[in-house]
Amino acid sequence: MTPTTIPPGTPAPATTRRAAPIIVGFLLCIFAIGTAELLVSGLLPQIAASMQVSVASTGQLVTAYALGVVVGGPLITVLTARMPRKGLVLGLVALFIAGSLVSAAATSYGLLVVSRVLAALSQGTLYAISLVVVTAVVPPERAGRAIAIVVSGLTVATVLGVPLGALLGQAFGWRTPFLAVALIAAAGGAVLAVAMPRTPASATGARSELRVLARRPVLLAITTTAVGFAGVGIVLTYLVPLLTEVSGFSGGAASALLLAYGVGSLLGNLAAGRLTDVSPLMTVRIVFLGLTVVLATLPFAATWQPTTFVAVLAFGLLATATIAPLQGLLLQHAADAPTLSVTVNVSGFNLANAFGAALGGGIVAAGALRWNGLAGATLALAGLGLSWLAMSRTATAPQEA
């Protein structure tokens, strides 16, 4: 991976000795946030009964959280552009903890919605700063792996955090999982409070962040995320119905396949991190090409259980493998003021999930559940084309200041 310039306000290379605890601190925080983002999905009936609202209305808590990330992330990043990074990180962790505690104590549906949005406001900026900081405290040749480790917090949240949260909710009530994620975030914040060095206020203001965001390669990288990752969302959102209704798996077997998908995602993400250290662009192209092939063959593989298993495992290996190289590619082009660009890219992932789920839902409603993979393959192929366009237009052109 090409060495990146350390942005103003981030730790200097001398902090490399603190890299491990800093990465662990961010990993705990990202795991807590990733779990909280999806936690409601496993607690819908309990929350609906407690708040005396419909399950459909309770599901809108997921939408409220997503909107908080998409809108709040860039806004908070711009407003806090000149704040010292350590104080900002700890403040964002405190904001997430406060939102989670209010969720646990909420006595009305309206307050629960507000608390979810409050917790979501911290996600985009905290996630962006975590990637910027960890790539600054490790040698340049290990930056991709550092990104992958932090990103794995989201993967582990999907594989373990959400199911464990659902079990906690069933055993001790739906409020307990919100307390648990608050405690995990507090633990991560405590580690960062000790390990993360103090830095002066960033010299990079909102104007610089916006100017960097407007660069063609940065915009193309973000567009690549929003378009290409939507192909994953189309299939993943409706994977369980595909496994049960088309492939004929039982509900228990489908859950086991989801676990296999999650383990594959974790391994694929870590492998992609290592490849990103060699070349983020090459890794992006390999992953999107692989996704295109796997998603295009999924409708045909889904008719026989052995090939379905292989296809789901391959899908898992590639699904989150896009994240580290896309972030690495973005950081190359936005090194001098990266926080807003990375935050908007995080919003791009959320928009991709929302768009993919909506498009996939339309296909399912039309009675074509089996063919979601072809739509996903089309978007993955578009992501591949956009990644090629991003480099072909900027490989020889100097970046704007």
Image (spheres, helix red, strand yellow):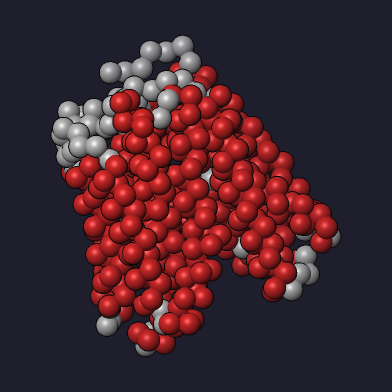
Name the residue nearer the viewer: 115 or 61.
115
| 190 displayed left or right of 241 | left
Q: Position of residue 107 (x, y in %)?
A: 27, 83
Q: Quadrant of residue 397?
A: top left
Residue 13 location, x and y as percent?
32, 25
Res. 60 image quadrant: bottom left
Camera-nearest residue between 310 and 214: 310
Decide which of 18, 348 is in the foreground and name it. 18
Q: Is residue 396 above or below residue 124?
A: above
Q: Position of residue 257 (x, y in %)?
A: 69, 62
Residue at image coords 52%, 55% = 156
The residue positioned 44% from the left and 44% from the top of the image is 150
Q: In the orientation shown, which residue stands out farthest toward the front?
A: 17
Q: Is residue 289 left or right of residue 307?
A: left
The C terminus lies in which quarter of the figure?
Answer: top left
Viewer can see residue 348: no
Identified at 60% across, 56% down, the residue is 262
Report how many numbered discs are placed on residues in the image. 0
Residue 200 at least partly seen: yes
Above or below for 317 versus 239: above
Tell me which residue sits at (62%, 53%) in the image.
263
Q: Where does the image place residue 334, in percent across and percent down from the top left? A: 35, 27
| Image-based side of 274 in relation to 168, left or right | right
